[in-house]
Amino acid sequence: MSTSITGRSAVDELPGPDGRGPLHGDGAGTGRLGDRLFGGAATASGIFVIALVTLVGVFLVAQAIPALQADQASFLTSREWATAGAEPRFGIVDLLWATVVTAVIAMAIAVPLGVAIALFITQYAPAWLSRPAAATIDLLAAVPSIVFGFWGLTIAGQYFEPVATVIDRALGWIPFFAQPEDGPSAKSTLAFAGVILAIMVLPIVTAISREVFAQVPTAHKEGALALGATQWEMIRTAVLPFGKPGVISAAMLGLGRALGETLAVTILLSSLNDGAAFSSSIFSGGATFASKIALGIQEANTATSTGALIAAGLVLFVLTFVVNAIARVVIERRKAFSE
Amino acid sequence: MKTLRFGQLASIALVGSIALAGCGSDNNSGSGTTAGAGSSSAASDCFTGTLNAEGSSAQKNAFEEAAASYKAACTGAQVNYNPTGSGAGIKQFIAGQVDFAGSDSALKTEEKDGVVETDAAAAFCGSPAWNIPMVTGPIAIAFNVKGVDSLTLTPAVAADIFTGKITTWNDPKIAAVNSGVSLPSTAIKVFFRSDESGTTENFTKYLAAASDGGWTAEPAKKWTGKGEGKEKSAGVAEGVKSTDGGITYVEWSYAKDNDLGVAKIDNGGGAVELTGETVGKAVEAAKPDGEGNDLRLKLDYATKEADAYPILLVTYEVVCSKNKDAQKGKDIKSFLKHFASSDVQKSLEEIGYAPLPSSVQTKVEAAIEALS
C-alpha cells in the first residue's frame, strides 16, 4: 500500500493519459478570469514569502558585515562580547552553546512527551476524552511566552531546585550535569530554561503528531491486530512507522521555536559576568542568541553594537535554516522508504 | 472543527484574564497621580495638541506621572514618552523625530562614534540645545540577608563586594563598618543588570570615583564586575528577593516595592540613609558644568558632605533653546514648567524619585522661562 503522509494515493502522481502531469486541469477553460485571478494571487503569495525570507537574509548580512569587519576578535570562536568603543571584540561561542543546550534539553523532553500524548489521544483515550484533551494541549500554544517565563521564575522555579540536586547527585560526575559551586539558583539555569522551552514546544509536537497518527489507515492497524499484535505492538509496527516523517517535521518545527524563543528565556536565564570561566554544565547560566539580542538591542546606539547583535541574529537565522534543511532531507528520505 | 472552537474560546478567556491580572498589579507605581493637578501654575498656559518625547527609561515613571497630572489640568493636551533609552532618545531628537529627549547623561561634548552630540543637536535646533535636570533618581544598594535589617557600606567595601573580592557576609571588612550588627556567614550573591543600562553606568561611575581604586574598570552601561545577570530592574530585584544573601544596585522604587533592605552609604562623612532629603543634598552639592541656562551637573560621587546620599543619577530633558516651531516651543515650556513645579516634584518621591532641591529648582525654572 503506498500512501504518503498526506493520505494522497500514489495514483495521483502518475501522469495523465495524455502526458499531462497529475492533478492538472485539462486546459479547456484557460482564459477564465477567476482561474487567472486565483492562480495569480496564489503565485504572488508564494513569491512574496520567498522574497520576504530573502530580504530578511539580505538585511541581516548587510547590517552585520560592517560590524564583523570591525570585530577585533574571532566572531566564531571568541567568548567575549564587548561591542562598545573603537575596538569591539565579540564572538558567539557562548551564545551558540547556550542556544543549542537549551534547545536540545527542550527537545529531549518535548518530543517523547509530545509523541506519547499524541498516542494517548489518538490510540488510547476514549472518544469523550480525546477531544477535550486535544483542546487543552492546543491551549498551551496560545499562552504568551512571557507568561511561561514569569510563571517559571515565580512559581515553578523553586520546585526545580530539588530536581537539580538529584540530577547533580546521580550524574554529577559528568561535567555536563554537575552543579557548579558558584552557579545561579536552579530556576535561572540553562536546564530550567530548557524545561520551560519544552512546555512551550509541547503543543506543536503534540498537535502535528496527533494529526499524523490519526491518519494511520485502519487497515494497517487492524492488520497488525489480526496478526496477533497487542496494542503496544500494533502502535510500534503500524502507527509509529507511518507517523515517523510527521513526528520528525513536528520536532523540527518545535526546535525552530526553541532556538528562537526570546522573552521567556530572557526572563529566566542568569547571564554570566565578563570573564567568567566557561562552564559545560547545564546548571550554569548564559545567554542564547535571542536573549542576547533582546538584552542588548535597547541600548545599542552605535552601528557596531547593533551590527554585532544583528550578526548574532544572522547566525541564529542560518542555524534555523540548517535545522530545517536537515529536517527536509530526513523527511524526503523517510518518504522514499515508506513508499 | 469543534475542538478548535473550544480551544479558541478557552484561550481567549485565558488571555483575557491574564491581561486583567496584569492591570491589577501594574498600577502601584501610579498612585497619587493626581497630586499637583489643578493647583499647578501650568494650568494657565495649557496647550492643545501632542508633545512627543523619547529617551531614558530611568525617568519613565516620573515622566508619566507628570504627564498624567498635566493632562488632568489641561484637557486636550497629550504628552507622550517613549522609554527607549537615553541613546535612542538623543538620536531621535537630533533627527527631529521627537520634540525633546530625556537622557540620563547630558549631551556629550566630545566625539563618540564620529558624532559630537552637543554640536549635532545645536545644528538641528539652529540654537544651542540645553540640558535641563528634571528628575533625580537615587540608586539603592539593595540586599536581602536573613537577620540583617540595617547595613552600612563604604564605597571601598561596596566595590569589593561587587568585584567578588568579598564573598561572605561575615567578612571582617563588612563587619568593620557594621559594628553591633550580627552578620551571618551566608555567601554573597551579587546580581547585576544583564541588559545595558544607565543605572549600571551611574553606579559604576560612583564606584570608580569614590572607592579609592577598589573599582578599576571603566564605567559603562555594560556590567564589568562579578555576579549573576538578570534582566532589567525588576529582574535584579526579584533575584535579590528570592535569594538569601543577595545584593544588587537598583532604582530606589524597586527596592521599596520589593521590601528589600537598603544599605546606608558612608562616604567618609558618616552613614547616610537613602531619603528624599539626603539625595536632594547631594544634588545641591553638584557643580554646574554648563554655561548659562545649560544646566548640566557634575555630580561629586565622592562627596564627604554629611547627610548627602551620593549614589544617584540625574536625568535631563534635552531641549532646543529656540525651537524652530514657536508654538512647539511654547508647548514644551508649558509642560516642563509643570514638571519642575514643586507640587509635581514632591509627588515623585512616592514613586521612588527624589524632588529637585530648591536651589536647583530655581535655576531650572529660570532656564525653562528662557526657552522659546
Image: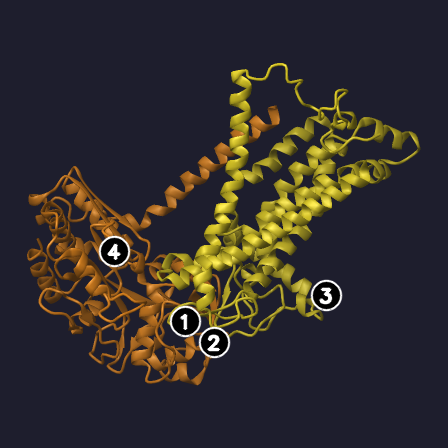
Chain colours: A yellow, B orange
Three-letter residue code for mark 1: Val
Q: Is residue A135 above or below residue B169?
A: above
Q: Tell me the quarter of the image containing the N terminus of chain A.
A: top right
> Which chain is mark 1 on?
B
Mark in the foreground, 3 or 1: 3
Are the residues at dot 2 and dot 3 in contact (C-beta closer than 8 Å)?
A: no
Residue at the extreme front of the image, as rendered: A18
- Mark 2 closeness class: few <14, some 14–19, many ≥20 residues within 10 Å: some
Give the spatial CA distance, label 4 vs label 1: 25 Å
Secondary structure type for disc 3: helix
Three-letter residue code for mark 2: Pro
Image position, residue B320 (x, y; %) = 15, 56
Secondary structure type for disc 1: loop
Write down the residue under mark 2: B184
N-terminal label among 4 and 1: 1
Mark in the foreground, 2 or 3: 3
Write down the residue under mark 3: A170
Locate residue A250: give its quadrant. top right
Q: Nearer the viewer, residue A52 or A14?
A: A14
Are the residues at dot 4 and dot 1 in contact (C-beta closer than 8 Å)?
A: no
